[in-house]
Image (spheres, rainbow, N blue to C red):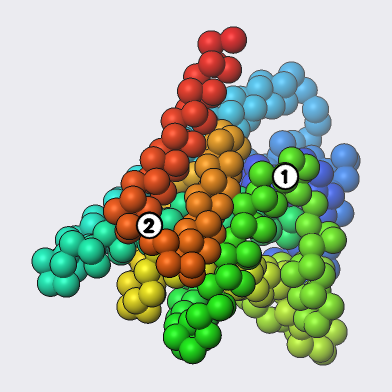
Amino acid sequence: MGLYSTCVPISVLMRAKPSLSHIPYPSSLSSSRTLLPLTTSTNYHHCHPLHRFPLFYSKRNANEDELSSSEEEENKNDDDISSTIYDASNTLTYASSVNTVAFWVCSAIAFGVGLGFKEGIDKASEFFAGYILEQSLSVDNLFVFVLIFKYFKVPLIYQNRVLSYGIAGAVFFRLTLILLGTVTLQRFEAVNLFLAAILLYSSIKLFASEEDESDLSNNFVVKTCQKFIPVTTYYDGNRFITNQDGVWKATPLLLTVAVIELSDIVFAVDSIPAVFGVTRDPFIVFTSNIFAILGLRSLYTIISESMSELEYLQPSIAVVLGFIGCKMILDYFGIHVSTEASLGFVASSLTIGVLLSLANKSDQLKK
């Protein structure tokens, strides 16, 4: 115990943040979570990373300077190796995400083509219009997911796990809402006007939203979850529930999942009526929703860092929601807009938004 308390392996210090002032004893040495203070008087340079025991010196001499210099160079090399491994891991994750997104997009295209051969071109057009619409709204929703992860300071290694649970819940909730929406629309045609009003309101809200909404402390969904879920102040690995002072409490990871689930329900209030504005077939509404959200986790990995560059995506989505809202009103009064025209408008609006964003980024780089 005495030898260990004066010698901390360099590998531990390299992984620690500069602001860390304590490290835990190994569990084999202490049954309790005793903390070992790190003081400036501890001779860390006596603990060579290649040894399991301390190196003792009778007095300080010039060799210590050489040793310190040698260790600094070795630590620098270790940092370079760690950085290389981290970059390689990130590259692998990014490449895997690209492949996953490509797989789901190709699957959606194959499904739409197969639907066209079986049910006709009209059904295929309805599916693709609904899929493109849902995909664009899902991308817009990722902006909010980024804010949620930042607000709760969710470690990067746990974000995919949270998204996986969020997507699983989204499939169930959306299926429920689609079935309820189908039954309601079949019985009450005037509900179309209510759904159209929701879409027009969402469109206007997106156009008028210029303020920074990165602070979620006053967000209704966040405040509701925090009110009803007792939460610890720390993360306990990847656990959703932990025991704190003999009381079982949720960790911030579970709170994050709850916020994302409720946020997706709020998003569905916009997205599902939008697809109902394109088609009344519940099968097409559901499948277009599912194909759009199945690749959401991998899509998040790809564009989470570059979302701020898609400056004109939100206005283009606002235009699309406004168009679908107007289309639903016209349909109610007997003026029908073809599915092909809707598909062309949705696709061209979103394409223009992305191209304008890329052009704006290019102009900024030139300056």
In this rendered view, identify the residue nearer to me: 2 or 101: 101
Could you give the CA–CA distance between mark 2 and mark 1, rounded to whole angstroms?
Answer: 27 Å
Residue 46 versus residue 333 in the image, above or below: above
Residue 319 can be seen in this image:
yes
Residue 207 versus residue 362 in the image, above or below: below
| Location of the C terminus (image quadrant) | top right
Q: From the viewer's perspective, is 25 left or right of 200?
A: right
Looking at the rendered structure, the secondary structure element under dot 1 is helix
Residue 9 can be seen in this image:
no
Amino acid at the residue labelled 2: Val
Residue 286 in percent (x, y) is at 38, 74
Residue 37 in percent (x, y) is at 86, 54
Q: Which residue is mark 1?
A: 208
Residue at 64% x, 27% y is 72
Looking at the rendered structure, the secondary structure element under dot 2 is loop
Residue 64 in percent (x, y) is at 72, 26
Amino acid at the residue labelled 1: Ala
| Location of the N terminus (image quadrant) | bottom right
Residue 46 in percent (x, y) is at 71, 39
Q: Which residue is mark 2?
A: 337
> Are the residues at dot 2 and dot 1 in contact (C-beta closer than 8 Å)?
no
Q: Residue 255: name its quadrant.
A: bottom right
Among all residues in the image, which is located at the extreme front?
Answer: 334
